[in-house]
Amino acid sequence: MKILATSGGFLPSDLGLFKWRRGPLIEHAIELAGNPRQPKFCYLGTASGDNPNGTLGFYSAFAGSDVRASHLDLFSMPNVPDVRAHLLDQDVVWVGGGSVANLLAVWRTHRLDEVFRECWESGVVLGGVSAGSICWHVGGPTDSFGSDLRAVLDGLALLPYGNGVHYDSEEQRRPLLHRLVGDRTLPTSYATDDGVGLVYDGTVLAEVVADRRDVAGYRVELGTVGAVTETRLEPRLLPGAGG
């Protein structure tokens, strides 16, 4: 029962805007799945409305490799005949960024909230970036509703924590997460700088990993005297990490 919740993942390449490459966090997701010889890796771009550019970038990252890449579209209809069977057959499911509020609404329409719990409990590694990180948690700060960040509170809650993403690159994220934890809107929460991933084994945070230096994860919680405390969690630098 593994989840890799990140503010990173696929990386840009020099070959073009939608020519992604496999970053260390993507490699780590495959490692968490046991490094199968031909890993089945499925991409969901629901949070971006199944933008075909994201799908193109995903396939370009695995071109010529042994990865058995696939994607699941939900707009305007599912592109596979049996969504549940397809997801349960994967080694890794990776969820792209975008609007987590819209993603959750669409998933529930298709009953993917139930399917993903089944996938998680059966050993499929669930992962993702930004919206694809918040979704596995209770909720967290999001720009789904506009440029002034608000809370989304109806995450799948496979993980009983709040979640903050892009902690070092978007200035509204940290203070809003602190406020949400402080007024008990969110429980104890975990956050990631860009390039950082949270590795959960079941519902326990097992490790923090990173694809670059000088970044971290964070635990944000309500202390015994009612003050919010933030603890920096130093990550393990993954093989192939940049500077």
Image (tube, rainbow, N blue to C red):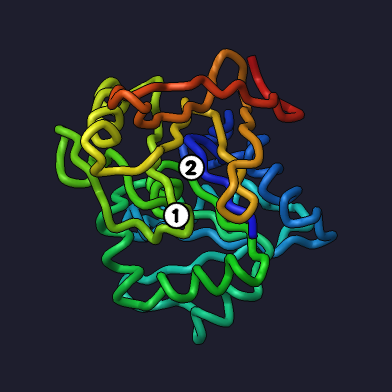
Label 1 to label 2: alpha-carbon separation: 26 Å
**Circle 1 — which element?**
loop
Q: Nearer the viewer, residue 127 or 231?
A: 231
Q: Position of residue 177 (x, y in %)?
A: 30, 32
| N-term mark: 1 or 2 | 2
Most distant residue in the bottom direction: 81
Residue with the most extreme right position: 37
Q: Residue at x 76, y 53 (%)?
A: 65
Q: Where is residue 45, by image quadrant? A: bottom left
Residue at 65% from the left image edge and 36% from the top image edge: 207
Identify the element where label 2 is drawn: strand
On residue 18, which mark appears? 2
| Image coords of residue 135 (percent x, y) | 39, 53
Q: Amino acid at mark 1?
A: Trp
- The one nearer the camera, 128 or 39, is 128
Which residue is at 29% across, 28% downward?
178
Q: Amino acid at mark 2?
A: Phe
**Residue occupying the point 16% across, 34% down:** 147
* Vertical order, 77 against 216 (above or below): below
User: How far across and down, in percent of the image, does residue 98 sit?
Assistant: 33, 47
- Quick check: 54 left or right of 32? left
Please indicate, yes or no, whether residue 191 appears anywhere in the rendered image.
yes
Badge 1: few (under 14), some or many (20 or more) residues near its Cα, within 10 Å?
Answer: many
- Seen in the picture, residue 75 relative to 186 is either above or below; the reply is below
In the rendered image, the quadrant that contains the C terminus is top right
Q: Residues within 10 Å of mark 2 (few under 14, many from 20)?
A: some
Residue 134 vs 73, above or below: the answer is above
Mark drawn on residue 136? 1
State whether residue 54 appears in this view.
no
- As drawn, is 27 to the left or to the right of 114? right
